[in-house]
Amino acid sequence: MYLLLFHIQNITILFWQLLRRTFSKPFYWRDLLFEMDSLGFASLPITILTGIFLGLVLTLQAAIGVHKIGAVSLVPRAITISLIREIGPVVGSLMIAGRVGSGITSQIGSMKVTYQLDAMRVLGTDPLRKLILPKFLAITIMLPLLIILLCFSGLVSAYFLASVNLNIGAVFFWNEVLRGIKFLDLINNITKSLVFGGIIGLFGNYFGLEVEGGTEGVGRATTTSVIVIFISILAADFILTKIFYEILK
Amino acid sequence: MSRQIIIEMRDVWFSYREREVLKGVNLRLYEGENLVILGGSGSGKSTILRLLLGLEKCSRGRIYIFGKDVTDLNEDGWFEVRRKIGMVFQEGALFDYMSVRENVGFRLYEEGYKEENIDRIVREKLRIVGLESVIDAMPGDLSGGMKRRVAIARALVGEPGVIFYDEPTTGLDPITARTIVRHINMLKEQYRVASIIVTHELEYAFSLADRLMMLKDGKFIFEGSVEDFKRSRDPYIVKFLGREEMV
Ligand SMILES: Nc1ncnc2c1ncn2[C@@H]1O[C@H](COP(=O)(O)OP(=O)(O)OP(=O)(O)O)[C@@H](O)[C@H]1O
Ligand SMILES: [Mg+2]
């Protein structure tokens, strides 16, 4: 319990330090772009694949549920709402966290145990500015974009399955999708992925910086980091869903 | 002989959590000398260098670098002090995602030098350690000895008056290790760079040292020349010497 408070305090301090560095010079634009590429664009395949399979599964589920009562026409809207409000951001963030969160922790962690972070400080550069902040910002910015892409690819795959299996036409399907998307759902979607991206960036970096005990330590920290990120994403999802539910009411 | 003191530690104490690592360390480094710090594993040798670089803060005592009291400096203050110090970490600590050129020139890139100036300075420093040919290699492709030499080249950028070496020869074969020793001695003779060298390898300690200090249980138990050290009757030093000969 004491340890938990200790970590929460440290993470808050790290967050504050990053925030202060975001709005002061020098700001490493090039490193930010580099990280957006390597953490963001490089996650495209995993994002699109996740989206496709989510779309397929959701369509099947909806079809099973709706077939009995003969309300096949509700399928597109049901898929759209669950994909955009809930399933897309959560499952997508978990998938991307598995890649990006573990990547950040293991990179920063191994730089720490081989004294590269110290070497950087000795050479006059602040590793929080040059390494940590760009990673944090990059995944926070890129995750919402990735999730929107994921939702879109999910809808495309859902459309294909629905048109083959349920005989739903293209015009009807996409019309229903557009009518299903509420402005607030989009805000919901983007807010969630922003927060989840922040969680991945902050915790991934934090556990990397905390590594102790050589290469083994890096392995252990990476596992811890991914687990903590997963649970935090689910917890944050609960809180955010609750907030949006209250707003909608 | 009144040589100038460039670094001084006065009664410095330091602990990791509850563990007392240093218990009243006194140290002086004079200009242009090689000072070797000997000590067993975990005796706190690296910690002394980390304190002198502001990577850790001591709990008691004062530290002076180039005549300035640096004990209570913040990170920005330390950035200023570290400009005049070179550091070669254990294993080199090269940035493994950057090329040798970017490693050695790191400070210059950060300070916004022009590409052609960076290239000139990087080549000049690599030439000193005999490695100009690997300028475009990645650290992962280099041998252990080459990594240390690149790390030395990186430490030389900025023309430091003093360089710290943490276990510069550990884990290297004898031939490579002697090359490193030669480079360190050459820097002293040709460029008048002072050095603190931390090691537990006696052979290299003896060929490097103008002065030797021995750390044990958080204190220095010996300070003097190589000859005095070899003649010492201190039981721990006798054991240290004897154990090394058997290896
Ligand atoms: N990050 C840390 N956390 C806790 N204790 C540490 C840490 N770093 C060092 N110590 C402790 O401080 C003591 C001194 O460490 P230091 O690295 O200075 O020793 P050293 O003389 O350089 O040893 P070595 O020859 O193994 O490099 C060690 O006994 C170690 O237990
Ligand atoms: Mg050490």
Image (cartoon, coloured by chain):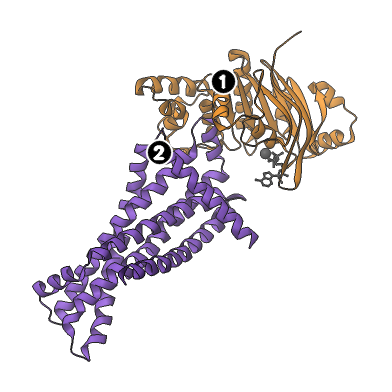
Chain colours: A purple, B orange
Q: How far apart are marks 2 and 1 (CA)?
A: 32 Å
Position of residue A212 measured from the top left corner of the image (x, y, whole percent): 61, 50
Q: Is mark 2 on a helix, strand or loop?
A: loop
Q: Quadrant of the C terminus of chain B?
A: top right
Q: Are marks 2 and 1 on the same chain?
A: no
Residues at marks 2 and 1 touching, judged by CB atoms closer than 8 Å: no
Q: Mark 1 lies on which chain?
A: B
Position of residue A215 measured from the top left corner of the image (x, y, whole percent): 57, 51
The residue identified by callout 1 is B160
Residue at the image point whose x is 53% and y is 34% from the top:
A121
Q: Can residue B96 be seen in this view?
A: no
The image's mark for residue B225 is none
The quadrant of the picture showing ligand 1 is top right
The residue identified by callout 2 is A23
The amino acid marked with disc number 2 is Phe
Q: In which quarter of the image is the N terminus of chain B?
A: top right
Q: Does the residue labelled 1 lie within 8 Å of ligand 2?
A: no
Question: Along the line of sight, which residue is nearer the eye, B69 or B99?
Answer: B69
Q: Is A74 on the left-hand or right-hand side of A143?
A: left
* Label 1 crowd bin: few (<14), some (14–19), many (20+), radius 10 Å: some
The amino acid marked with disc number 1 is Pro
Residue at the image point whose x is 84% and y is 33% from the top:
B237
Q: Can residue A74 be seen in this view?
A: yes
Position of residue B18 measured from the top left corner of the image (x, y, whole percent): 75, 48
Q: Is B63 on the left-hand or right-hand side of A156?
A: right
Position of residue A65 measured from the top left corner of the image (x, y, whole percent): 26, 86
Q: Is mark 1 on a helix, strand or loop?
A: loop
Residue reaching furthest top? B1
Q: Mark 2 lies on which chain?
A: A
Residue A230 sits above or below residue B5 on the image: below
